[in-house]
Each structure stands twice: as C-alpha cells, then as structure tokens.
Image (cartoon, rainbow, N blue to C red):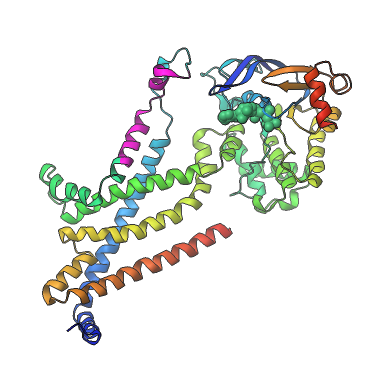
Amino acid sequence: MIQTIDLYKSFGDLQVLKGINEHVAPREVISIIGPSGGGKSTFLRCLNMLETPDSGQIIFEGVDITNEKVDIDLHRQKMGMVFQHFNVFPHLSVLENVTLAPTVVKKISKIEANEQAMELLNRVGLADKANESATSLSGGQKQRLAIVRALAMEPDVMLFDEPTSALDPEMVGEVLDVIKGLVKDGMTSVIVTHEMGFAKEVSDRVVFMDGGIVAEEGTPDEIFNNPQNPRTKDFLSKVLY
Amino acid sequence: MFSLATILENIKTLIENYWQVFIFEGVKYTLILSAIAVFFGSIFGVVIALGRMSNWKPLRFLNKKKAKKGIVHAISEFNPISFLCSAYTEILRDTPLLLQLYLFVIILPTIIKVADFSMFTWTSIALALNSAAYVSELIRSGIQAVDKGQTEAARSLGMNKIQTMIRVVLPQAVKNILPAIGSEFVTIIKETSMASTFFIGDLMTSYLKVKGATYLALEALIIVAIIYFILTFFLSKVILAYERRLNSK
Ligand SMILES: Nc1ncnc2c1ncn2[C@@H]1O[C@H](COP(=O)(O)OP(=O)(O)OP(=O)(O)O)[C@@H](O)[C@H]1O
Ligand SMILES: [Mg+2]
C-alpha cells in the first residue's frame, strides 16, 4: 500500500533520514519506536509529504507521490494523520471539525456530512459534545476528535505521530482504546509511539529507528523479547526499566 | 500676563465662536481621512501581505540538481512578487510620512494630471498607501501567529492551500489582526495632522485657522489637543473591549 524507496531527508546540515526502505501492506499495523531525534516523525511526515524528501520515492497505491506533477491533495485524502498536539480547529465546533474537510474537499452536502460525523462522534463517545466549541474539550477528547476528523475522509491508511504523548496519564487509555478499535476493524496504520505495551499489543510489525535508519525490525515478539541489535537492546532496557 | 483665568476664559470664547470649525471641519475631516486611509489601506494591505507570503518561484526549473545551497539555489528560490511587496513595505515604513505626503500632494499632481483629483484626494491616497505598508505587516504577523499545526492538520486532510487559508488560518488570524488594525486607526488619527501642512481641513488645520483669526495660539492648541485625546482615548477603549470579547469567545 505504501512503499518507500531509499528515502533521504536533511534539515540544513543535519541528515535526519539516511535511506529508508519500508513497505506497509494493506491492513498491516506498524509501530515505529526509537530514541528522540531518530527521525520517526520526519519519516511519518514524509509519507504524506508534509515533509518533502530530498531523494527517494514514496509509492502510495501505485503512484509515486514525490513526483511534483502529482496532485498531492488528492492522495492526502486517503491518508489520515493524527498529531501529537491534536491540532483540532479551535474556531469550529466539534461537529464542524469533522465536517469541514468532507464538505470543502469532497463537496458532499452538509446534511450528509453531519449525519456521517454524528455517527463517527458517537463511536468515540463525543456525540453529546457535537455543538460545543472544540476548545472546551479535554486533551483526550481533543485527540479522539482529531482521529474522527481524519476518519471522516474515509482514508485507506492512518498515520499516528505519538498520539498520546501530550496527554495526562489518565487520558491515555481512552485514546489508545479508540486506536485499538480502529486497528481491529482492519485499518492500515503506522503508529509512532513511546507506549511499548501498546505497540506490543496492536502491531503486526515493530520498526526500531535510530540515527536516521531502520536499525532493526520484526514482530513484536522478536523486537521486545529477543532484540538482536545492541542499540535496540539498549533503548528497550531504558524504556522498559 | 499668563493667568490661568484668562486662558480658561479665552478657551471658552474660542469654543463658543469656533466650535463649528473644530467639529464640522476638524473632527469631520480627520475622521474621514483616517477612515479612508485605514479602509483602503487594509484592502491593499491584504494584497501586499498575500504577495509577501506567496510561493511563486518562476526560476525553480534552473535548479535541476536540487541543490540546497549556493548561487543556483538562491536564484531558483527568487520570488519576484514577494520581493516587490517586501520592497514596498520596507520603503514606505523607512521613509517619513511627511516626505511621502510631499511626493503625493505637491510633486505627483504636476506629473500625473487627473482633473478632478483635489489635494484632499491626493492626501487620502498617500495616507492609504502608507497605511497599507503597516497593515500588511499586521496581517502577515497575524497569519504567522496561527499555529503551524493548524495548516498541517488541514493539508493532511486533503485541503489545498487556498481552502486551508480561507477556512482554517484566516478565521483564526482575524482575532489577532482586527484589534491591531484598530490600533492602526488610532495611530492614523494622529498622523493625519500632517495633512495640515497642505491646509486640508483636518483638526490641525482648524487650529491653524482659529489661531490665524484670533492669535490665541495656546488656547486653540489646548482645545485641539483635548479633542485628539478624546478621539483616540475612547477609540482605544472601544478596541480593548472588542478585543476582550473576541478572546472570551
Ligand atoms: N523542521 C525542522 N527543521 C530543522 N530540524 C528539524 C525539523 N524537524 C525535525 N528536525 C530535527 O530532525 C531530527 C529528527 O527529528 P524527528 O522529529 O524526526 O525525531 P523523532 O524520532 O520523531 O523524535 P521524538 O521522539 O523526539 O519525536 C531532530 O534532531 C530534529 O531536531
Ligand atoms: Mg517525533
């Protein structure tokens, strides 16, 4: 579904991605773990071209989206993204947050968009907040809203960049539960996370990134119970105590 | 000679005899000039701000090797629209308004002959163009103050640049921009006083007229000062109240 070929990216003199070759299969759930500054976010943001790679290709559903002639907006509709800091639209109500993109981009009618949005909001327990301002929500509610906002575009794949890192501990569970539900329904997902227990539970494959390369990857069992690379071992020993 | 009682007495007489000059000429033209300057300045300011933030790089094709440094990179990144708009803003902000007024009211009319353009019109144009330079900066910084995550969220949903700007960024930027434009209006009210150089009819011109007729310079100046103060003081208060209301929403 998504394939990256030899992805390189630097910011000024700092080389952040040093040749990433990855492949995301349909319905696959991939967790990306690794130390801070290792390039996880940059890699994820390259997947929907929020960052433009210096070289390499990203093949999404058969199209090389790094090609400048490609209409990237069209492909982004098929890739939902959830950010660490939620980025809900503060000037809109909860419902409008969800309906904005479908009405503006897909041009579906307001009535239809509202109906679909209410259904989605209901699924994450936010239906009763539909008409409140998005700013009035708690962190966990904002992140659930952000997820639903992305789902309203009916994406083929979801990209999560540390979806729970900015949350108070008591709110982490409610957001992870929503993601687990999605994954169970077969949503293809790439999840950058520091929640090792969660990564272990939901992933088909765990990717360990360090220093701009994929240092090791494998099944959760291989990575967490039997890591081969000393850097993986070192990282895990720090985060798992 | 200078007794407070005499001054107060003179002020009273001036107000009684000349209040129409102060109100129906001075205040009227000062407010009209300011309103014209800020209104057209804002419209033109939006254009300049968008021009500065535009992303048009017609020479990008020169950088085939995607160099990230060096002369080729610099040339390929050149944006003529943005350059012109920045130049405009910088030049108008870095030269005195009085100089610009001379250019537009004294010099340009001798070069560009528009029959029904009065001195008042030329003054309005100069003030509006000057105001546009300042307003464009207010708009630009208002837009840039909106969290970058907002743009990223909108773009990641498939919205294009224009949709993102109109539906996500501008509605949030307006909260930063409107109060700032209000303050610009207050500043302009004071700056219109320079129009009196050409005897346009603004508040400062009223002072010149009344002084000329009565030789009561100090008294006339005090009256004008009080009027300016009232205008700007209350306008500032109104803006502040409006800003509070915006933020409480
Ligand atoms: N826009 C940018 N401009 C300059 N440097 C950047 C930019 N974005 C990221 N970097 C740098 O690139 C490196 C990799 O950043 P990245 O965010 O991809 O790491 P990460 O693995 O997601 O780390 P974290 O776990 O802290 O989120 C960091 O050193 C970061 O400072
Ligand atoms: Mg990150």
Q: Position of residue A212 (x, y in %)?
A: 66, 20
Residue B79 highlighted magenta (yes or no): yes
Indicate the quadrant containing the C terminus of chain A: top left, top right, bottom left or bottom right.
top right
Image point (19%, 69%), residue name: B206
Which one is in front, A94 or A208? A208
Indicate the quadrant containing the N terminus of chain A: top left, top right, bottom left or bottom right.
top right
Image point (49%, 65%), residue name: B241
Q: Position of residue A196 (x, y in %)?
A: 82, 31
Q: Is residue A65 above or below residue B107?
A: above
Image point (50%, 47%), residue name: B173
Figure quadrant of residue A24 = top right
Give the residues drawn in magenta, as a range: B68-90
Magenta stretch: dominant secondary structure: helix
> Which quadrant of the render holds ligand 2?
top right
Residue B59 shows in this picture: no
Horizontal side of A84 relative to B5 (left or right) equals right
Q: Position of residue A181 (x, y in %)?
A: 82, 35
Q: Position of residue A12 (x, y in %)?
A: 53, 24
Which one is in front, B185 or A80? B185
Q: Is residue B63 above or below residue A126?
A: above
Horizontal side of B190 relative to A199 (left or right) equals left
Horizontal side of B234 relative to B100 (left or right) equals right
Which one is in front, A237 or A165? A237
